[in-house]
Image: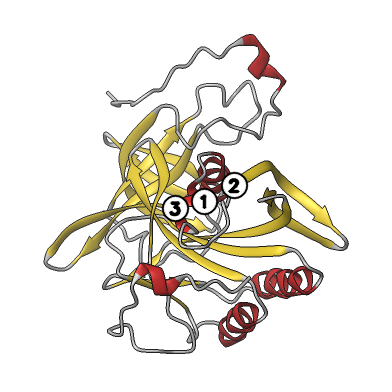
Amino acid sequence: MHQFICNLRIFPLYLLQIPHQERLNMDYNCIVEGIFLARPNRFIAHVDLDGQTVVCHVKNTGRCKELLIPGVRVLLEYHRDAQAKGRKTAYSLIGVWKLREGKEPLLINMDSQAPNLAAWEWLNKQGLSAVLSSRPQPNQVTDIRREVTYGASRFDLAFLLDGQPSFMEVKGVTLEQDGLAMFPDAPTERGVKHLEELIHASREGFSCFILFVIQMKEISCFTPNRSTHPAFADALSAASHAGVTVLAMDCLITPDSMEIDSPVPYILNGLPCGQHLSPSSAYPDNN
């Protein structure tokens, strides 16, 4: 029999006005653990649940080859209303325990939709204000909106920072090697385009941020994955020099939740990972 972790909530009537995509927090309903078997394509996986093979939707189209190894434990979200909503599968694969030599497995959330929602929740809790606390301004975040169009661009988040219009792009990070988190895990021309759009908005006078949401703990530093996509690494460096604030944050991960937690030092321009930065020096006042 499958053991589910199910969160049941009763919402006040007025909250029903919130659009469906505006979930209130980064929690999951009805989580079950299984054993990963195979990934026939980037959209689905086969998972063993108590001796029964089930087909799951993989909520991450990245390669994830270092994570999805046959035999590893994975987390699935069970959708009780799958048939009523016309879903092809009743399960979504949202997490994995990454195997590590000489260490306990590391729980990683690999849901590509989770970082944006976690960032929205983090902004609403004034998490950005805490990270920018060394600046002289109050750093008050208000009027937070999601999926905002500016010119030909569409940014993940828009808000007012001490009254100044601001934009933020959010990137989820699941690639880790010996405590070093990296992005991307595959070439991303779309990611380069987002950085170029942030540079343009910054030059137009907006306060701009790129937030790397590292979907795990136990990370010592973050760096762009230059060996996989040099153009993204160059664009990130250019964005930083153009006034775009680079942020990297790790997350508290449980089987049924993900919450942005602590700043992680980042390294640009190929500096060695051993040259660790302090959290304060990792976030220069470059706006």
* Residue that carries the numbered disc 3 in the rendered image: 110
The first of marks 2 and 1 along the sequence is: 1
* Residue that carries the numbered disc 2 in the rendered image: 140
Disc 3 packing (10 Å; few <14; some 14–19; many ≥20): many
Residue 72 shows in the view: yes
Q: Position of residue 169 (x, y in %)?
A: 64, 60
Q: CA distance from mark 3 to mark 1?
A: 27 Å
Residue 44 shows in the view: no
Q: Which three-letter amino acid code belongs to the residue tagged 1? A: Ser
Residue at disc 1, secondary structure: helix
Say which of 146 and 137 sits in front. 137
Q: Position of residue 8 (x, y in %)?
A: 44, 17
Quadrant that contains the N terminus = top left
Disc 1 packing (10 Å; few <14; some 14–19; many ≥20): some
Give the residue furthest to the right.
151
Q: Which mark is residue 129?
A: 1
Residue at disc 3, secondary structure: loop
Q: Is residue 130 left or right of residue 142?
A: left
224 to 31, vertically: above or below? below
Q: Is residue 25 left or right of residue 74?
A: right
Quadrant that contains the C terminus = bottom right
